[in-house]
Image: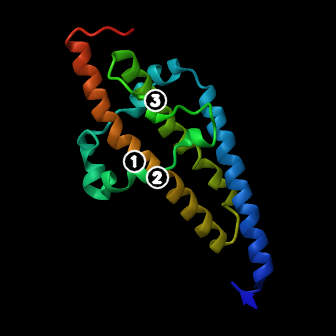
Amino acid sequence: MKVLGEMTFKKLLKLGIFHSIYWFTTQMALASVGTKFPHTFFTKYSQLFKSFSWEKEGKIWNDLFKINKWKGYIPEGSQLNQNIYNKKQLTSFKLNDLHTMIIEMRRAEFVHWLSMLPVLAFLKAPTHIKIINVSYVVLANLPIIITQRYNRPRLEKVYQLKLKRGAHRD
């Protein structure tokens, strides 16, 4: 049986397995590297993670993609890598806990943007390979990025309010 021109089903299956291993390995390695970045990086470069005015403090993402309906289905990264901050660890709204969560949300967004870069390895690949890999990388990472961009501004707002009211970091 011929699939995609001269490619047999067996060859297509091997290619699928290879690409699955490539993406899993690459993304786990990048997640591991991401955990090594110090908190100070995400504080120093906080401007990279600011909401644009058109994002309406993240509201646009829920309006467009109904994030509240599906964000609970996003797998928790800490299940695959114990060095990844578990978002369920935010059990209090103390200033220090909020700050840590905001930093970790920036880290998650950063890592998922980085995780899209390895798709460049497929620039010279046949069109169908490019389409499959670009589709995968967008579908695997963009939902997490937009979820961070939806949730983080709201948490930052709570953090700023607590700061204005005189709360202190522990």
Front label number (2 vs 3): 3
Q: Tell me, for residue 89, which label it has, or none.
A: 3
Q: CA distance from mark 2 to mark 1?
A: 6 Å
- Describe the element under mark 1 as helix, strand or loop: helix
Real-space Cα separation, disc 2 to disc 3, in angstroms? 23 Å
Q: Is residue 102 left or right of residue 26?
A: left
Say if mark 2 contacts mark 1, CB within 8 Å: yes
Cβ atoms at labels 2 and 3 below 8 Å apart: no
Q: Is residue 113 above or below residue 33?
A: below
Q: Where 42 falls versus 127 (above or below)?
A: above
Expressed as whole percent of the image width and height from the top left, the position of residue 118 reads 65, 50
Which residue matches tag 2?
Answer: 142
Secondary-structure class at tag 2: helix
Residue where numbered disc 1 is placed: 146
* Number of other residues with Cα within 10 Å of mark 2, as a class: few under 14, some 14 to 19, many 20 or more: some
Quadrant occupied by the N terminus = bottom right
Three-letter code, disc 3: Gln
Image quadrant in which you'd find residue 59? top left
Under tag 3, what secondary structure? helix
